[in-house]
């Protein structure tokens, strides 16, 4: 268990940053996916 503590200290910060960025990107990807799904309906009306 003592060998894991330095590893978590070294890798912990990048993991937290990565998870935060993925969380932010996820919301934007959901908006993008919704926009792509709505595109055919918008193209029919124009």
Image (cartoon, rainbow, N blue to C red):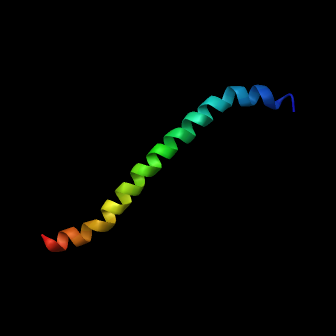
Q: Which quarter of the image is occupied by the C terminus?
A: bottom left
Direction bottom: furthest residue: 44
**Up/down of 41 relative to 21, above or below:** below
In the shown orientation, is residue 24 left or right of residue 44?
right
* Number of numbered markers: 0
**How far across and down, in percent of the image, does residue 1 sit?**
87, 33
**Residue 2 relative to residue 33: left or right:** right
**What residue is at 51 percent from the left and 45 percent from the top?**
23
**Residue 14 percent coordinates (x, y):** 60, 32
Give residue 5's quadrant in the image.
top right
The residue positioned 26% from the left and 66% from the top of the image is 39
Q: Residue at the left extreme?
A: 46
Left or right, residue 24 beside residue 33: right
Residue 33 at x, y = what percent? 37, 60
| Residue 21 horizontal side relative to residue 43, left or right | right
Residue at 41%, 56% (x, y): give it.
30
């Amino acid at each position: 268990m003592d060998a894991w503590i330095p590893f978590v200290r070294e890798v912990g910060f990048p993991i937290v940053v990565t998870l935060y960025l993925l969380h932010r990107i996820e919301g934007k990807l959901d908006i993008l996916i919704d926009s792509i799904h709505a595109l055919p309906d918008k193209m029919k009306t124009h």
